[in-house]
Image: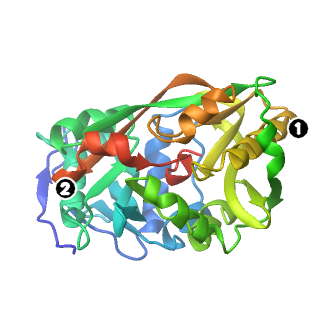
Amino acid sequence: MHSRQPRSVLKQASEPRRDVLVRPYRAGDEERIVPAFNRIFAAVDPSFRPRSMAVWRWEFADNPSGFASFVAETDEGEIVGQYAALVQPVVLEGERATFLHGVDSMTDPAFRRSLTKGGLFARLGNAFLDSHGGRAPERVPVIWGPPVPAAWRIGKTQIRYVLVRHQLKLVLEHGELRPDCRAGRCEVRLEPCFPDDVAELFERCAPAFGVAVVRDRRRLDWRFCSHPEKSYRVLCARRAGALVGYAVSCTSGFDGEDGETIVCDWLVPADERGASAALLEALALQAASDGTRRVTVVLPETSHPWPLMQEAGFVVRPTRYLLAARVYDERYRERWLYRAFYYTLGDMDLV
């Protein structure tokens, strides 16, 4: 899948000429990727918290579905850029396929400023994406994510990113949940990890989505139960012993707001209104117990939980995020993704 990329000479304005090689990740590169990540992001974000090697290993090396990455390396062995993505198995119109979710893309500003047309970020992005993109099932039809503004500006002109949507969020202020008598039909419990029958729940929900990232115990336990630094809470709703929905939450900041109860994942069949009501009630109680001001949910506004949550008292607010994609199959262009792609914050690396 990977091919060695040719060297190109990148002339520095104030330094001697240096060569940069764009190539696929090799085992051990993380020992230089993590310091580069911390150095580059600390220079542009005053609130940045350094990433530990434990978090890198959790997100990449321990990911049960795998990852892919290209790096930019100088002749001296310094990593000065990366374009990376997490592998995501999906159900795409009823068939198994693979998407890639872009994460941790970066370029050293010293190199970024001095490059010729296209730049190092564009070189990295195009090399990476063209090595993986193509029609399913042999290759990856969609590579997606919420790019930072600088990456979006370059991506839409140099890497053929397309805009899927300006992301909205749903917010429930303290005390605003509207009671629903159907909530009493289900029992909600806080679980230490995910049950085996969560895969059956996903299979029940999947036909309602044009495409969704697969939810099974292995992936969900990795995402929410094994993070080395963050804590998540798993709420499972059952009726007569059967799993009819779940929600994952954390107490965190999001989109410039602090002290919120964030709904990181939500999976409830459209016809299980009682399970939805019970989980929303449990989330509101959890937020009150934690002393947070609100419950925040990020979902596509085209998905079936959206109007249900509005009926329950959630209000729509804008976010600073947009969702973009590089599409390699004309059947799944941006308008189709806008209508058909079901995702939550748990499918991204924002919380």
The x, y position of residue 206, in whole percent, is: 47, 60
Tell me what residue is drawn at x 46 percent, y 72 percent: 65
**Residue 85 falls in which quadrant of the image?**
bottom left
**Is residue 303 found left or right of 275 in the rendered image?**
left
Measured Cα–Cα span from mark 1 to mark 2: 46 Å
**Frontmost residue, 329 versus 18:** 329
Q: Is residue 260 visible?
A: yes
**Frontmost residue, 125 versus 313:** 313
Residue picked out by circle 2: 328
Residue lying farthest right?
289
Residue picked out by circle 1: 289
Tell me what residue is drawn at x 26 percent, y 41 percent: 334
Tell me what residue is drawn at x 45 percent, y 67 percent: 30
**Is residue 298 found left or right of 91 in the rendered image?**
right
Q: Crowding near pointer 1: few (<14 within 10 Å), some, many (20+)? A: few
Q: Regarding mark 1 in the picture, which secondary structure is present there?
A: helix
Q: Amino acid at mark 1?
A: Ser
